[in-house]
Image (spheres, grey):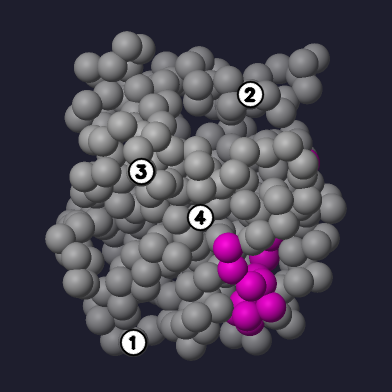
């Protein structure tokens, strides 16, 4: 089913987030995107006419997604027009969790108070984890795709001093997307050169085409949170996350390695939890041929009976 696009004004703010919905009669599922690209380029992006949202919708789920402030179709904070170095990183986990709260409240109004399943990717798992810990009664099941755990890495810059925002080109994205694939292995991206995804990504920011090279301006709060997590300060307490939780990750995901997943599984407060590894896949598995394993694992987890 085609998605329905709408907007939601955040309580106590002039910020507006872009909402997308693939309606169906089943349980509501909210997708929470990661640090560098919005929902239309992730859960809503179609390969051969089929997106992850379409797959969940075909399984009977009422699928929702939104763009955090500063991304995609949502309001861009005024600080993103100031010199980056003059402002602290924008859009950190605390603020992002408040945006999730507003969206979940909207979904529950539409769905007569139903609990909402959450599927989150990468940095988005921190915002989703914080929300799930604060509002456990509102959350059904939780999927953490390529979650960021907690490490203690020396030599990283201070998280609060990396600037408010940064510009990301298609070349920047492609370099990041392929860096974890073994050099001898054929490409795993469905679009190896991002031939269609790349222009669609640039189109998510009205100012992108005027930069040299064309680049999308994104908030740096997510990157600051990832740096903080890598230096021992995770932005939420996993012990407070009690919803049934599945970690799903690619075998080549350098941001969620075996030790990271084991730490997070041990730290989560949930009694029902799982760690699923998809072979020959990376942190960007939803854009890769390995996405079929991701889609199947996610659909099966969300379809389980309440524990």
Disc 1 residue crowd, few under 14, some 14–19, many 20+, Cα 10 Å: few
Whichever of callouts 3 and 1 sits on the residue coming sooner in the sequence is 3
Q: Position of residue 58 (x, y in %)?
A: 43, 57
Q: Residue at x 26, y 28 (%)?
A: 203
Tell me if residue 247 is in the magenta stretch.
Answer: yes
Q: Say whether residue 179 is visible.
A: yes
Residue at mark 4 = 124
3D distance between C-alphas at marks 4 and 2: 21 Å
On the picture, is 119 further left or further right than 5? Answer: right
Whichever of callouts 1 and 4 sits on the residue coming sooner in the sequence is 1
Highlighted magenta segment, given as a residue range: 235-251
Of badges 1 and 2, nearer the viewer stands: 2
Whichever of callouts 3 and 2 sits on the residue coming sooner in the sequence is 3
Tell me if residue 93 is in the magenta stretch.
Answer: no
On the picture, is 249 further left or further right than 212? Answer: right
Between 295 and 9, the one nearer to me in the picture: 9
In the depicted structure, whether residue 283 falls above or below residue 27: above
Q: Position of residue 290 (x, y in %)?
A: 65, 38
Label 2: state its secondary structure. helix
Q: Quadrant of the C terminus?
A: bottom right
On the picture, is 298 further left or further right than 193? Answer: right
Of badges 3 and 2, nearer the viewer stands: 3
3D distance between C-alphas at marks 1 and 4: 23 Å
Q: Position of residue 149 (x, y in %)?
A: 70, 56
Between 162 and 97, the one nearer to me in the picture: 162
Q: Residue at x 19, y 72 (%)?
A: 12
Disc 2 residue crowd, few under 14, some 14–19, many 20+, Cα 10 Å: some
Disc 4 residue crowd, few under 14, some 14–19, many 20+, Cα 10 Å: many
- Can you tell which mark lies on residue 87? 3
Residue at mark 2 = 178
């Amino acid at each position: 089913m085609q998605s329905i696009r709408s907007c939601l004004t955040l309580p106590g703010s002039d910020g507006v987030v872009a909402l997308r919905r693939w309606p169906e009669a089943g349980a509501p599922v909210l997708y929470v995107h990661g640090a560098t690209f919005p929902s239309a380029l992730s859960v809503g992006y179609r390969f051969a006419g089929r997106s992850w949202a379409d797959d969940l919708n075909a399984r009977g789920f009422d699928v929702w997604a939104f763009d955090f402030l500063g991304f995609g179709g949502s309001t861009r904070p005024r600080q993103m027009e100031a010199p980056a170095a003059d402002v602290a990183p924008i859009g950190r986990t605390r603020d992002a969790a408040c945006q999730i709260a507003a969206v979940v409240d909207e979904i529950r109004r539409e769905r007569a108070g139903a609990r909402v399943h959450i599927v989150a990717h990468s940095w988005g798992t921190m915002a989703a984890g914080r929300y799930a810990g604060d509002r456990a009664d509102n959350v059904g099941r939780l999927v953490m795709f390529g979650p960021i755990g907690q490490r203690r890495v020396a030599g990283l810059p201070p998280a609060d001093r990396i600037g408010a925002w940064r510009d990301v080109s298609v070349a920047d994205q492609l370099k990041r997307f392929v860096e974890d694939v073994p050099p001898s292995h054929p490409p795993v991206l469905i679009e190896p050169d991002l031939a269609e995804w790349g222009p669609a990504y640039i189109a998510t920011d009205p100012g992108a085409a005027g930069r040299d090279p064309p680049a999308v301006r994104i908030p740096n709060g997510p990157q600051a949170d990832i740096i903080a997590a890598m230096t021992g300060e995770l932005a939420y307490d996993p012990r407070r996350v009690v919803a049934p939780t599945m970690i799903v990750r690619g075998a080549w995901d350098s941001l969620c390695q075996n030790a990271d997943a084991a730490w997070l599984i041990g730290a989560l407060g949930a009694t029902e939890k799982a760690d699923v590894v998809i072979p020959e896949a990376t942190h960007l598995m939803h854009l890769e041929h390995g996405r079929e394993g991701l889609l199947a694992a996610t659909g099966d987890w969300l379809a389980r009976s309440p524990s």
